[in-house]
Image (cartoon, rainbow, N blue to C red):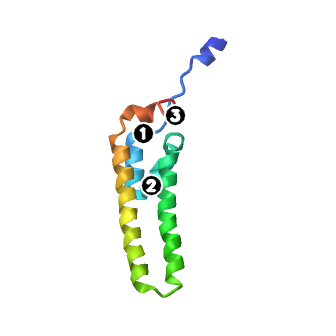
Amino acid sequence: MNNKLNNTKKTSTKTKMTAVLISIFFGLFVWLYTIRKSASKFIVAFFTLAGIVLLYSIISEFDLYFLSMLLLVLFFIATFGTWLWALIDTAIKPDSFFENYPNK
């Protein structure tokens, strides 16, 4: 009886299609979908964007308009870059990555 219980294989309910849709609509937060394997990517992307926002909020208090606008442009470029990185990273992973998650 115990062998039957131990032989059951835990299958993941994660799918590649769901991950791609999350990456399209939520960008870097797709890495939270597979947090055990992608935590470092999420941390790097999140704190890069958070650092730019922090710099912008500090600089904008000193009325340095050119630098503020430069940081805003940098923020939008970084946001697009992390969104594209998340989308490509998710799209190139095989279906088996999600089906066997977190074992693979």
Q: Quadrant of residue 78?
A: bottom left
Which residue is at a point 36% across and 52% down the rendered structure image?
A: 85
Q: How much space separates mark 1 and mark 2, taking CA atoms? A: 17 Å
Residue position marked by numbered label 1 in the rendering: 15
Look at 42% across and 85% down and name the residue there.
65
Indicate the secondary structure of the residue bearing disc 3.
Answer: loop
Q: What is the x, y in percent for residue 66?
A: 39, 83
Separation (CA) of disc 3 from disc 1: 12 Å
- Give amino acid for label 2: Leu
Q: Which mark is residue 102?
A: 3
Helix, strand or loop at mark 2? helix
In the image as oriented, which residue stretches furthest toward the bottom?
63
Marks 1 and 2 in Cβ contact (< 8 Å): no
Do the CB atoms of the residues marked 3 and 1 lie less than 8 Å apart? no
Q: Which numbered marker is on residue 75? A: none
Q: Amino acid at mark 1?
A: Thr
Res. 28 mark: 2
Give the tally of numbered discs: 3
Residue 45 drawn above or below residue 16: below
